[in-house]
Amino acid sequence: MDKKSSKKERAKEKAMDEQAAEEIKEMVEEQVEPAAEAENAKSEEQVEDTIEQSEEATMANKLNEANDKYLRLSAEYDNYRRRTLKEKMELTKTAGESILLALLPVIDDFDRAMAHIDDAKDVESLKEGIKLIQTKFNDFLGQQGMKEIEAKEKDFDTDLHEAVTKIPAPTEEMKGKVIDCIEKGYTLHEKVVRFSKVVVGE
């Protein structure tokens, strides 16, 4: 009987020890799991904070680069605007230089003709000299793109002619045509810069 009681007691003690061990294990796990979860949550928050800081730094760098690029472009445009404005002003001042230089030989011919006009005895030679100067001047105008508008005995054209007055046509064919040209008209590169002032037959 003593042996059986002893075995039962030892079995009972073993069972109690195992139960106590199981309870201790469960208590330890209950304490460890929240701590682990808290640690994991803290780690995740740190990772998220690091990612956010990295994204903010990246955006800040991009913003700085964009601002720097804008400032450079603004400065370049300002320099370009000033340079083109200066070139335009210089061009305006010297735009007529080449035309005036080309006109100087004609003026020289006029000066020479005027210097000898009082001493001229041959009227025909004087007339010929003036005609040559006129031809030279007309050639100069042609080189600049300016042409005389043909008017006399042409059909009256409001796009080219300006009627100063109307007179009875000398013939039936001259009705609606230019009888006489009082002031010549000119085109510059096909654009009318001065209308011909004409007398129209009716």
Image (cartoon, rainbow, N blue to C red):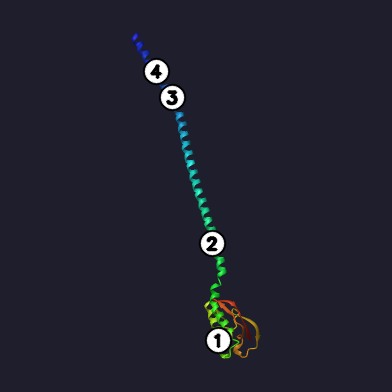
Task: Mark 3 vs mark 2: give the one in front.
Answer: 2
Residue 1 visible in this rendered orientation of the protein? no
Q: CA distance from mark 1 to mark 2?
A: 48 Å
Given contact means CB atoms under 8 Å apart, are the residues at marks 4 and 3 in contact?
no
Given contact means CB atoms under 8 Å apart, are the residues at marks 1 and 4 in contact?
no
> Where does residue 54 sit, x and y in percent of width and height?
47, 42
The part of the image, by quadrant, that contains residue 155 is bottom right
Q: CA distance from mark 1 to mark 3?
A: 129 Å
Given contact means CB atoms under 8 Å apart, are the residues at marks 1 and 2 in contact?
no
Given contact means CB atoms under 8 Å apart, are the residues at marks 3 and 2 in contact?
no
Which residue type carries mark 3? Val
Secondary element at image label 3: helix
> Where does residue 56 sit, x and y in percent of width and height?
50, 43
Dot placed on the residue nearer the N-terminal end, 4 or 3: 4
Dot placed on the residue nearer the N-terminal end, 1 or 2: 2
Tell which of 10 and 41 is nearer to you.
Answer: 41
Number of callouts: 4
Given contact means CB atoms under 8 Å apart, are the residues at marks 1 and 3 in contact?
no
- In the image: residue 197, left or right of residue 77: right
Task: Please give the label number shown on residue 83.
Answer: 2
Tell which of 190 and 98 is nearer to you.
Answer: 98
Task: Mark 1 vs mark 3: give the one in front.
Answer: 1
Looking at the image, which residue is at 34% across and 11% down? 4
Q: CA distance from mark 1 to mark 4?
A: 144 Å
Task: Mark 1 vs mark 4: give the one in front.
Answer: 1
Which residue type carries mark 1? Gly
Task: Please give the label number shown on residue 17.
Answer: 4
Which residue type carries mark 4? Asp
Characterize the local packing of mark 1: few (<14), some (14-19) or many (20 or more) Cα atoms within 10 angstroms: some
| Residue at the left extreme of this rendering | 3
